[in-house]
Image (cartoon, rainbow, N blue to C red):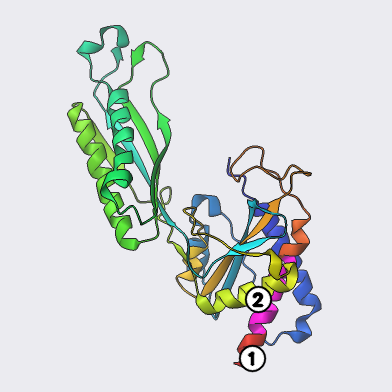
Amino acid sequence: MHACAHDAHSAMLLGGAKILQEMKDKLKATVVLIFQPAEERGVGAKDMVAENVLDDVEAIFGLHLMPEYPLGVVATRPGEFLAGCGSFNAKINCGKVGLEGISQRYLDPVLAASASVISLQNIVSREMDPLESQVVSVSVINAGSDHNVIPDSVTFGGTYRTFNPKSFIALRKRIGEVIKGQVEVHRCSAEVEFFGREQPTVPPITNDERIYKIARQASSMIVGEENIKLAPTLTGSEDFAYYMEKVPGAFILLGIKNEETGSIHPGHSPHFFIDEDVLPIGAAIHAAFALSYNSHSTTS
């Protein structure tokens, strides 16, 4: 379940729009508000860029609600922040369906897939620099539908994440090699796909130093300096990165954790719940950033 607060993100941006409209006499610039679909598929921001939403835009700001931080706490960092993410799908074919009671007569794609999944974990643990954050995860496996039948094929897929563009290439290359090598051991064949709209590659998020300082200052005005935290680098991904490839920007996390209201579950959990007291905070931060950036631009 991609429960991740995007409805709240839209509500906060609408709130920010209302505040800015009421204070428009203080603005000496045009503020563009981006209500973007399809973040969960990793292509929404890319499509918005293609629709020229960033024309004449000098800087960009975004936020995401985060249940790991207490309500009203802002967490961010300059420079590298969120990892880039790629996806892969693999299909293993072994020819024909077989009866598991006489498995010696058939090739087994489930066994080949299992060996592949286990071997993929060795890429990060044994082949990559341990000081460089990288992740390879298999999160989907589909095989047969009957307990006593060996299926003729298995499909599985997952993601790979890193902050380093060169590591992206290395991970992608090794994922394909490992899957095809393991499958060959089991005398099956494999098709591995990395590209396409269903498997987008999302770039890393790197906060621009200047825009980060403005965003941090604007957030501090709303939540107080005591509620500004330096976030660690995170291997989660966000397609907001497509905007930041075009214009300098900053991305922050805004806490919603509140045990009294039950706002404690992680994003993508079916129990995910938002403490709506965060909505005016997020709206105010949006407006404060626009006003602060406008002020810095007109005085610099």
Q: Residues within 10 Å of mark 2 (few under 14, many from 20)?
A: some
SS state under label 2: helix
Q: Nearer the viewer, mark 2 or mark 1?
A: 2
The residue most toward the right is 22
258 versus 281 height, above or below: above
Q: Is residue 44 magenta?
A: no
The amino acid type of the residue labelled 1 equals: Thr
CB within 8 Å, label 2 to label 1: no
Please state the horizontal and vertical placement of residue 24, each as a whole percent of the image: 76, 81
Please state the horizontal and vertical placement of residue 62, each as a whole percent of the image: 60, 66
Q: Which residue is mark 2?
A: 217
Q: Foreground: 181 or 213?
A: 213
Residue for point 69% across, 64% down = 227
Residue for point 23% across, 32% down = 183
Q: Which residue is mark 1?
A: 298
The residue most toward the front is 226
